[in-house]
Amino acid sequence: MRIDLHVHSTASDGTDPPGALAEKAVAAGLDVVALTDHDTTAGWETAAAALPAGLTLVRGAELSGRWYGAEPTVGLHLLAYLFDPGHRPLAAELARVRRSREQRAERTVALLNDGGIDVTVPEIREYAAGGTVGRPHLAQALIRRGLVGTVGEAFAPEWLGRRYRLPKADIDAFTAVRLVNEAGGVSVLAHPRASSRGHIVPDTLIAELAAAGLWGVEADHTDHSAADRAHVRLLARDLGLRVTGSSDYHGANKTVRLGAFTTDPSVYEDLISTATGAVPLVGASRPPTPPTA
Ligand code: AMP
Ligand code: FE
Ligand code: FE
Ligand code: ZN
């Protein structure tokens, strides 16, 4: 069984529509794929409708979290799986973060304009195409103007990485873990040692999140070195957290391929038997054509 538990679509900052991911997942030799768009469940229905026989879809999201207990505060990404999307407080938090992302995009456009770069808000909205707005959509505008060559370059300190980086109103990390649990889901801390984002998530904070109900932690990820992966595994063992591995596929917005990292089947079995908010969806084989009378 090949299981990839972290994939993005055009419902956030990936470049493949949710309905097209299923076929790509099959082509990549996957048996299970989780759709985890940033702060939204908008792609769930389309992905489910396009599910081919033999592929299982785990419906999820990647929540923008932050620990406000340190200065500077610590941003983190929390993968949430198989939660009830109708859970009001969780859905309200996701909607709040999406609005904050739109406001941040507007303020970033203004900042870029001040810097003499003539990007526009409607243009960014067009790139986001109704999905969760993220910095990769701002990156598209910089690429179109020839200011940078790739999305990766757009995250350099002189661009969206620092100079033109503005905060958004992330969900308090402990509230996020609690709400996911209340909604019947399970939470996994994504890429805690991806230092290219400017910081890592401290082990002490991971321990506190584990005590607060965090279920697992992502060890195998393209932004983790071999030493990072080993460190996360040891920490997980100490804290009783499950360990996952995932691609964090974003289509053309990142270089990593679908299924580049995978999760152990026993961890997946544990996940689906723990979550109560939603079930994994199994692609059905086409019903046989009924005999004509
Ligand atoms: P945001 O959530 O809008 O602040 O943007 C963060 C997103 O940008 C991440 O989810 C990645 O998809 C993408 N990203 C962050 N750093 C990089 C990078 N160095 N290269 C390419 N994409 C990146
Ligand atoms: Fe992303
Ligand atoms: Fe992430
Ligand atoms: Zn991600």
Image (cartoon, grey):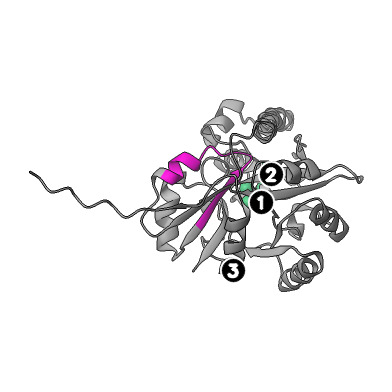
Q: Position of residue 288 (x, y in %)?
A: 22, 52
Could you say which disc has been placed on residue 180 in the image?
Answer: 2
Quadrant, the C terminus = top left
Q: Amino acid at mark 2?
A: Val
**Is 102 rendered above or below residue 54?**
above
Residue 285 in sight in this render: yes
39 inside magenta stretch: yes
Q: Amino acid at mark 1?
A: Val
- Counting residues from the N terminus, which is met first, the one under dot 3 or under dot 2? 2
Instruction: Give the CA distance from mark 2 to mark 1.
Output: 6 Å
The answer to whether 281 appears left or right of 291 in the picture is right
Q: Position of residue 161 (x, y in %)?
A: 74, 47
Tell me: is circle 1 under 8 Å from ligand 4.
no
Residue extent of the magenta highlight:
33-48
Q: What kind of element bears circle 3?
A: helix
Q: Position of residue 202 (x, y in %)?
A: 85, 57
Could you say which disc has been placed on residue 186 in the image?
Answer: 1
**Is 235 rendered above or below residue 289?**
below
Q: What kind of element bears circle 1?
A: strand
Mark 2 packing: few (<14 Cα in 10 Å), some, or many (20+)?
Answer: many
Q: Nearer the viewer, residue 17 or 119?
A: 17
Quarter of the image holding residue 272? bottom right
**Residue positioned 69% across, 30% down in the render:** 96
